[in-house]
Amino acid sequence: MTKTSSTRLRVALGLAVAAGAVVVVTMRSSGVPAPLTVGASAPVVASPSPALSATAPDPDDLARTHAVPGYLPAGAEPAGGKAVLHGGWIQHFTLPGAANSRELPATPTKPTPGVPMHPATGIDLSQWPQDVSTFQGVDPRLATVVTISLPGATATVVTPISGYGVYRVSWVRGGVAYDLQTQHLKAGGDEGTSGIPLTELVKMAESIA
């Protein structure tokens, strides 16, 4: 994404369930996070970059040649990946802080009244051997959809209108469909909102070779 494109891109907040992913969240707060924009992000000290794959992603062998981000948001850590059906690969990254920690009750029948509840929040990068994007549409009443430029590809950015839910960047390049996601969920107390800013998610997408 060029600096000009980054500056122009303004994305509203919202709630969306991305195509192909089902997210079940119980939230007990009406608070809404501050608006986010996709633009020049504030300086962030990134974690050490993980080792890049030995070769370019091969659609026929993503378990060995999958792409790895050259940039990670501060505190994000690789938490292992796994091969999935139909030749895909999914990599998970953990995020630090109480807001990203698991807040589900010990038993679903005994939640704490008035306390937001959610699973641990991280970042997921999926790669599939196909020429069709994993994004297949979303209800415009729930999310804003825009396109941005990445190196060698055009990406779809999905932003929940309410500010809570799945934030997503999807693109296709070299016979591989990429899908990068995080979630913004309301945390308890003064912990704020889980996940990472959309600007950081876009920077990760830009760094994927």
Image (cartoon, helix red, strand yellow):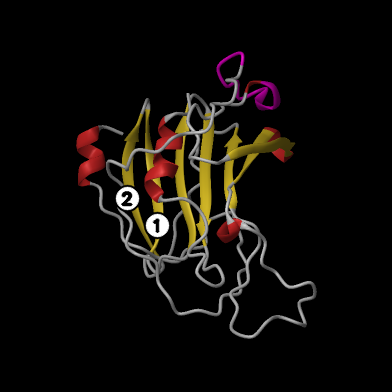
Q: Viewed as shown, does residue 194 lie left or right of 42?
A: right
Q: In which quarter of the image is the N terminus?
A: top left
Q: Is 199 one of the magenta-colored residues? A: no
- Examine the rendering and report whether any part of residue 18 can be seen: no
Q: Where is residue 10 in the image (x, y as percent from the top left)?
A: 26, 53
- Contact between marks 1 and 2 (CB within 8 A): the answer is yes
Residue under numbered circle 1: 159
What kind of residue is marked 2?
A: Val
The single residue placed furthest to the right in the displayed view is 107
Q: Viewed as shown, does residue 15 lie left or right of 40?
A: right
Callout 2: few (<14), some (14-19), or many (20+) C-alpha neighbours within 10 Å?
some
- Disc 2 element: strand
Q: Position of residue 191 (x, y in %)?
A: 52, 65
Residue ID at (64%, 58%): 101
**Quarter-wise, where is residue 54 in the image?**
top right
Residue under numbered circle 2: 146
- Examine the rendering and report whether any part of residue 194 can be seen: yes
